[in-house]
Image (tube, rainbow, N blue to C red):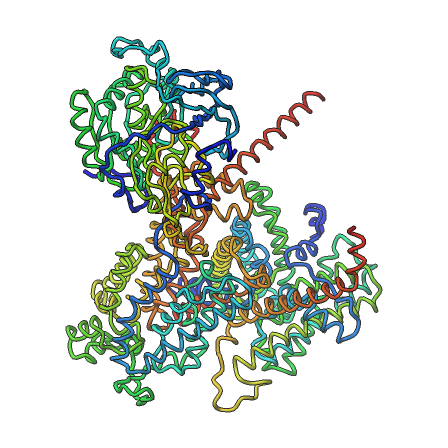
Amino acid sequence: MFEYLLLFLSAVLINNFVLTRFLGLCIFFGVSSSFEASLGMGVAVTAVMVVASFFGWLVYFFVLTPLNLTFFTTICFVLIVASTVQMVDIVTRRFAPKLYAMWGIYLMLIATNCVVLSVPLINVENDFNLVRSLVHSVGAGIGFWLAILIMASIREKLAHSEVPESFKGLGIAFVTAGLLSLAFLGFSGMIAL
Amino acid sequence: MIYHFQGGAKVAHHKHRTEGKPIEALPMPSRLFVHIHQNMGAPSKPVVAVGDEIQKGQLIAEPTAFVSVPIHAPTSGKVVAIETHPHPSMGKGTAIVIEPDGKETWVKGKPEQLDFRAMTRDQILTRIRDGGLVGLGGATFPTHVKLTPPANTPVRTVILNGAECEPYLTSDDALMRTRAEDMVTGLEIILKALGATESYIGIEDNKPEAIAALSQAAKRLQGCRVVVLRSRYPQGAERSMIKAILGKWLPGGKLPMALGVVVQNVTTAACITDAVVRGIPLIERVVTVTGSAVNQPKNVRVLVGTTWADLLRFCGGTTSDLSRLVAGGPMMGVAQSSFDTPIVKASGGLLALSKRDIAVPPVGPCLRCGNCLEACPMGLAPFAFPTYVRERDWQGAKRANALHCVECGSCEYSCPANRPIVHSVRVLKKAIAEADAKAKAAKMETKAGVGAA
Amino acid sequence: MSENQETSSALSPAEQIAAISGPFRGSKQTTLSGLIDDGVFGKNPVFVLALSLCPAVAVTNSVQTSLAMGLSVWFVLSFSNLFTSIFRNYINPKVRMPAYILIIATLVTMCELFMSAFFPVLYQALGVYLKLIVVFAIILARAEVFASKNKPIPAFFDGFGMGLGFLIAMLVIGVPREVVGSGSFWGRPIFGEGYQPILMIILAPGGFITIGLFIGLFRSIGAARERARAAARLEGAGDAMEVKRV
Amino acid sequence: MADKNPTTAANERLLAPLLSVASSPHIRTRETIPRIMWTVNATLIPVAVWAVYIFGWRALLQIVVSGLAAVITELVIQKQRGVARTWHDGSAFLTGLLLAFCIPVGLPLWMTALGSVFSVAVAKHAFGGLGQNIFNPAHAGRAFLLASFPVQMTTWTKMASLAPSAVDGVTTATPLGILKEATKLGHDGMSEVIATFGSRQAMLESLFLGNVNGCIGEVSALLIILGGVFLIYKRYIFWQGPVFYLTTVALLGWVFGHKGLFTGDPLFQLLSGGLVLGAFYMLTDMVTSPITRRGQIVFAVGGGLLVFLIRRYAGYPEGVCYSILLMNCATPMIDRIFVAQPPRSDLSQTEGGQA
């Protein structure tokens, strides 16, 4: 149990996908200019990540490995992620229309997104068992959510600041992300994985 | 028990220059400029013509609406002009120019002493309106309107406001020390007019003599309590007063009547006595002339319409480093651009400030120190207002309750970066009003369009 | 995926991706110097490119990995455009996105196998980021926007140009990061014993901050050049404008 | 008008001709940004003097280099940007001063200067300068130095001599460093720390009065507390921040001691490391902390929790810097939640419903 907690915390804080692994930056910088959008995006990313990890794990260990086709992993996982997005889209639209109204528009944006693809890939590369992969992907999603919410709240504040002209927008967003990442270094070494 | 309210700023009093000084009467000026717009609401309409001989206390302008008051001649003399003249708070306005004859003959039919206890409520209100009374704390809201609550909101409590929290000013203080009896009588009249029973007189703790005088005078009035308030700016603001005394908070955008309360200034109460009992209309008032740039600071009794120049001359003139003339107190008063501006009913003070008094550091960036939040009596976030102006975000400002701001200036006073907060709020209020009017007009248009279709 | 086209909004996924990745477009310049000039200082697509290929930036902490990543993307981008263009008339528009992804993924897998066979150390260093080339927004976007509508040869060179731009971006970020952060170039120390490298630059925060500072720097240089150009134009047209205004 | 009106003629003799007109209020507090900043700087002078006494002139050199680098950076940037030049308002110097207070005295001076430049240029001016920065510049500078030069930043050179170049090469660990290392090895960390001082009494005395190894800002809790209390008295900082921060750290340190529940030493946790300096001078930084008092309480408690987590579980022995930087990230979010609030309305529901 404790092991899973550590794995979770590690994915959220120490190896935060955005701040230490440079993943999901398109969405991170693209969406974080609005707080409400970030809120929805975080949920969508987490949901897709967990479902994609689940199917990715099944496919990898029950199809690709026995057939010795692991070099197909990348291709398979891309298709899994894309179809997961489609599936989540259909399911939420059918069964949770309210939820769909809230973050349905973000689903398409993550159909081909690096952070969503990388989590299943990292899971299988590290030979995680099914529970570990799921915990890891939930942690990754929450970590992404945390980072994008922090970033969004900071950028809303920066919108009212007199940031130098040449740093406005993307420039200051990167510097902010750098300082965020610097602050998150404080967690390093917290859990030895 | 310390009576206090949320927020507020510790502002240096600067009252020592005129504190405890007797009220002196100003010699008759050579000319008086009586503005026809001296109250909140509609301006009055002149009923005299150029060349008319007029008597002291004669009606010279009549009200044009319910929220409007009559104006009376401050002295006897001749109307020499009705012209545009500088106004202390509105820039310019129409004034009736009177050349006094120095005889001070009262208009005929000046009523005898009357017993208000024998009067009906309507009679009292008529006398108050005919006396041209407005709120003398600065708001200039017609008194008879304030004393006419809608039938469904009974008023239980009356608070007499003797806080005089504005720095420098001591005119209310001087009156409280000398006319405490009249104030209590005025309070009785107000209570009767409203059918209220409970009353308080709130005075800041830096005016011990006034507290003593009013405590003595109020003994005869049942259910009246003199409350000593912590001196903290803006204690005299209506909401702060109610919060401090009754412990109840009146949210922004609401009138005290919603809580069953009416707040009246102490000077207004004294003038109510004058108007109702003695039949003397509001034609003169006490003005504190003070500030480091005036040679002999004084509390002066002056006729409405006297110019700043006459007042300052009576007070020994100004020093050479005079840099700003302010009508009212330093926190909410209006800077004057002319010495020819006359006093109006609401003018409680004239400040002559030197360069040193008004020296301000350059405007700096907001440090988010939080002083303005701590100081705001309305619980707003004043630091954001300049940003709303810069970004022209009127709707955001409206959501941030900019309209609730009372412009007391506590935030700007406390700001170490000298941010122009109060000015921003004024800009915002104007812009919000314009935007709302535009939206309303657009809505009407679409409605009309739909109707036509 | 086919349902996507009917159910999603008017924007295709690629367009949606483009919308959130910021505007990116190929340089109009054809010469290398023109490309670099326009790319680095002018419209600054270098960093827009870097953004739409964000995970790639994670490996810019050394020149070798930057170069390897840049070359891989160059290869994938050029050939994905080529094959997309070749097959453009055989792909049912309804399933074109999965088809493009399939093409790209195949190329990436080839790249992966090649690297692991001949440069195992680099392959290890690039890790998961090499696989993630599959989902780089710009590759998919070029396939959708350009390759699917043009003949193979122009399509190939479109990808070729964009890929080169990206390679430059990787080196622009990667070289300073290795030099400052490790005090070395291509893994060899260049400053001698006394130099104390600023380690943070090769860590994640350094990556973000370096890019942020570069964006600011290039944009201010670009703005200064724009101002100078406008001033020159104004000087030339000054008299005419005066007349016009009158 | 003038010829008709005698009062106007009188004006010319009587009164000054020019009146300045401005929006109210016409008077204001005497507090200004430079006054606040230089006062805060001044309250740190006793600490600096004590540090020079303990560490020698090298401490002063660090302060001067760091402060100067910060001020010069600010001047250059403001000149370059063409904005108001406020380099002399004390805020840049304060950044440099605080940075010097939380780095080892023996750090090579060029690193100090680099950290100071980073603080002012990246953490402050990239965001628009004073009042706009998200992160505490001094702590951002320290985190930058720690990430860049981990060895130098954790080398604590003992300096007893007053000679400026007297780096005698003897390195020792800070009390928290000893605790961390010993605990990692499975030893009884607290006993080892106490052993270096002789007794618990002596340890606490040294920590409180200032006779321990570490940064300038770690040497004397007493002097820093005195300075901080003065700032609270001047109302430059709210008391809630330091009190809740310190209490949280002490409480958690006591409850979750290394030997089991309620075995920790709260006083040791409080007095060691830069905690007190952080509590009074960094956590309360007006610009980067929440603006409301309630927000500051949340901020402080969160910071305290992070200090405990980092000291206890993370790789670094000291958590103050990161705890404050991490809470700085959360400040805009806290400000979203804890906004200024009008007093609770006392209108009855029916009357106040539409208010």
In this view, B336 is above or below C100: above
Residue C226 or residue C40, whichever sits in front: C226
| Residue A127 showing in the rendered view | yes
Q: Is residue D77 left or right of residue C63?
A: left
Quarter of the view holding residue B381: top left
Q: Position of residue C40 (x, y in %)?
A: 68, 71
Q: Is residue A78 left or right of residue C35?
A: left
In this view, D79 is above or below B309: below
Q: Position of residue D48 (x, y in %)?
A: 29, 74
Q: Is residue C106 left or right of residue B91?
A: right
Q: What's the residue at 60%, 76% (across, down)?
A: C174
In this view, C187 is above or below C161: below
Q: What's the residue at 52%, 76% (across, down)?
A: C202
Q: Position of residue A111 (x, y in %)?
A: 63, 56
For the C terminus of chain D, the image quarter is: top left
| Residue D342 showing in the rendered view | no
Q: What's the residue at 28%, 84% (across, down)?
A: D158
Residue B253 or residue D185, whichever sits in front: B253
Q: What's the residue at 56%, 59% (across, down)?
A: A28
Count of numbered badges drawn on the protein: 0
Residue B172 or residue D103, whichever sits in front: B172
